[in-house]
Image (cartoon, grey):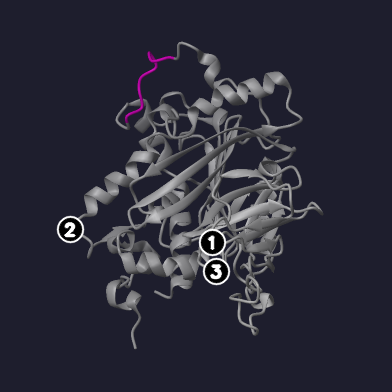
Amino acid sequence: MSTVQEQTIRWPEAGATRVPYRIYSDQDTYMKEQQAIFRGPVWNFLCLEADIPNVGDYVTTKVGHSSVVVIRGPDGAIKSLVNKCIHKGSVLCHEARGNRKRPNLVCPYHNWVYDLNGRLTGVAFEHGIAGGGGMPEDFDKKNHGLKALRVETIRGLVFGTFSDTVADLRTYLGPEMVAHIERTLYGKVKILGRSSQIMHNNWKLYIENSRDNYHPSLLHAFFATFKINRLSAEGGTIQDDHSRHHISFTKRFTDVGHQAYDSGILRAMKDDVGLRDPSLIDQWMEYPDNITNAIQSLFPGFVLHQIMNALGVRQCIPLGPDKCELVWTQIGFEEDTPEQTQVRRKQNNLVGPAGLVSMEDGMIGYLVEKGIKGSEDESAVIEMGGKGTGSMPTRATETSVRGFWEFYRELMNV
């Protein structure tokens, strides 16, 4: 018997170099993703350890459609549980964040109580009133616990998975991705700010965009105009051994120029354009490798960015076939000097929903969704840099986009 996916999506024979437009709008595909990907053998970003520094601190977030709560227990360990009472399905924590003085979760509907391991420990009126009512004799609280996620951390980042079979987090990421996280997050993470935006496009369009190495100096005129990120600067593309995850990096001060930019035909402005406050793009060379811009995208929906000295994480949350939420968290380090913190805060104007070099990303996915309406049986062409995957000493490539689709197809069995 064929699956719904097989009935609605036919993948072109060209594999990862062709992506069917229908994949961005098909409701059945979207629902299958919830189990095959977000509840499948992957690690999903949950929050920062800095979000829950104290015992009892919690945040609520989403893994795909599933609401989960992440909480720091009395022993300091981080737990994550599905935020849904077993009784009638009500959420247990309805606030975005807070602190639980008692080490339990209580349903606001009928007061079912769970400990932080997800065990059901109390049911209001379990034994009835004055000998009447109550739960049946064969009711056993041990059989009605909350679903717990496996949780692992790396450099202040908290990840969770529903899978019992996926490898540990570091193995899943691979040594190249782990090394870059440890390189970028070298201090104790401090939260500087947070914002979010609703984007009217499929979540995969944004994640593709985060792996698209050669659009920054084309879509983002600010990057090219002020020579922050151009393909004519030294840079490259790094992938893990399975091409599931990606890093794109640039060394800003190595830009040798290129006729395409210098002529202005790529929307790069002329040299007579300047900033009233040029300190906005002043930076200190923070890393010994002299990388000034780096975007790391981890399957399925996490991004770690370094744009000069602006550091942050992004979490892409699917909200439907044509809608997702992007949560931005700007960060620094507890070890930063006041002057360094001020530089980071100023450069954070470059990123976020209205950022000078990222606001276009919130729009371009919608333009794709709008453009492909009525053409769902056609496919995108993903051939820049060849047809394969793997690391390359250039950013004029879509190798990382192809890597995303190869893993996606493996998980979705398409």
Q: Earlier in the sequence, mark 3 or mark 2?
A: 3
Measured as percent of width and height from the top left, residue 399 is found at 46, 56
Task: Using a 10 Å C-alpha cutoff, classify the residue at mark 2 as few (fewer than 14 neighbours), some (14 to 19) or many (20 or more).
Answer: few
| On-image quarter of the C terminus | bottom left
Which of 34/409 is in front?
34
Q: Which mark is residue 243?
A: 1
Q: Answer with left or right where residue 214 lies relative to residue 66.
A: left
Identity of the residue drawn at 61% across and 47% down: 59
Task: Using a 10 Å C-alpha cutoff, classify the residue at mark 3 as few (fewer than 14 neighbours), some (14 to 19) or many (20 or more).
Answer: few
Start-end of magenta stretch = 267-274
Q: Which mark is residue 87?
A: 3
Identify residue type, mark 3.
His
Which of 2/249 is in front?
2
Q: Earlier in the sequence, mark 1 or mark 2?
A: 1
**Picture layout, residue 61 above or below residue 161:** above
- In 3D space, how far apart are the residues under numbered discs 3 and 2 (Cα atoms)? 44 Å
Please give the residue where the numbered disc 2 appears in the rendered image. Answer: 374
Q: In this view of the protein, can residue 236 be seen by the observer?
A: yes
